[in-house]
Image (cartoon, grey):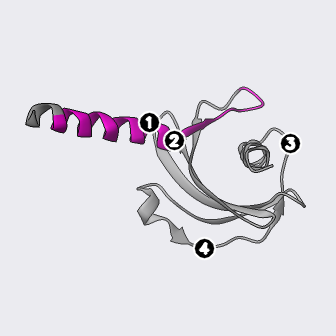
């Protein structure tokens, strides 16, 4: 019985980990990286999100704030180590370039919270 219980806990943990990452589709080809949404939280018209880019040689974690009304974004911070190592260093709000990974992220988030 104990073995079944522990096996169940392991499987639940695995399912939770898989569900915690949501693939973000790209609108254009060419980028060999894959993008995944890890966390997001809506606050009025803005969405705070953490996503990661898994590239050929490295993985990078970025925290962003997206304004769905203006379709502008700013980076709050990033890390090449982990989510918990993201250091706050906010940029100014910027316009999104159509077809860019940030534009795809904003469109994905704003559609999700519509």
Query: What is the number of the mark on residue 18?
Result: 1
Q: Which residue does the numbered mark 3 point to in the structure image?
A: 98
Q: Residues within 10 Å of mark 4 (few under 14, many from 20)?
A: few
Labels 3 & 1 near each other (Cβ < 8 A): no
Residue 21 placement (x, y as % from top left): 51, 41
Q: Residues within 10 Å of mark 2 (few under 14, many from 20)?
A: some
Q: Which mark is residue 64?
A: none
Residue 17 on the magenta segment:
yes
Contact, mark 2 vs mark 1 (Cβ under 8 Å): yes
Q: What residue does disc 2 label?
A: 21
Mark 4 / mark 2, whichever is N-terminal: 2
Q: Earlier in the sequence, mark 3 or mark 1?
A: 1
In screen coordinates, is 63 left or right of 106? left
Q: Residue furthest right?
A: 70
Circle nearer the viewer, 2 or 3: 2
Give the CA distance from mark 3 to mark 4.
24 Å
Stretch of the chain drawn in magenta: 5-29
Gap between marks 4 and 1 measured at Cα: 29 Å
Quadrant where the N terminus sits is top left
Q: Earlier in the sequence, mark 2 or mark 3?
A: 2
Name the one closer to the observer, 109 or 51. Answer: 109
Which percent across, then down, holds residue 41? 64, 60
Residue 54: % across, % down:
51, 39
Real-space Cα distance between discs 2 and 3?
Answer: 24 Å
* Relative vertical location of residue 101 with respect to residue 46 in this rendering, above or below: above
Q: Comparing marks 4 and 1, which lies closer to the viewer?
A: 1
């Amino acid at each position: 019985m104990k073995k079944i219980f522990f096996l169940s806990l392991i499987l639940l943990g695995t399912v939770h980990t898989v569900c915690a990452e949501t693939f973000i589709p790209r609108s254009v080809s060419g980028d060999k990286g894959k993008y995944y949404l890890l966390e997001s939280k809506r606050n009025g018209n803005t969405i705070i999100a953490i996503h990661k880019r898994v590239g050929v040689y490295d993985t990078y974690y970025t925290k962003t704030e997206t304004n769905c009304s203006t379709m502008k974004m700013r980076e709050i911070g990033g890390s090449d180590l982990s989510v918990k190592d993201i250091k706050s260093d906010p940029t100014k709000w910027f316009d999104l370039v159509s077809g860019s990974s940030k534009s795809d992220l904003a469109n994905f988030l704003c559609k999700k919270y519509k």
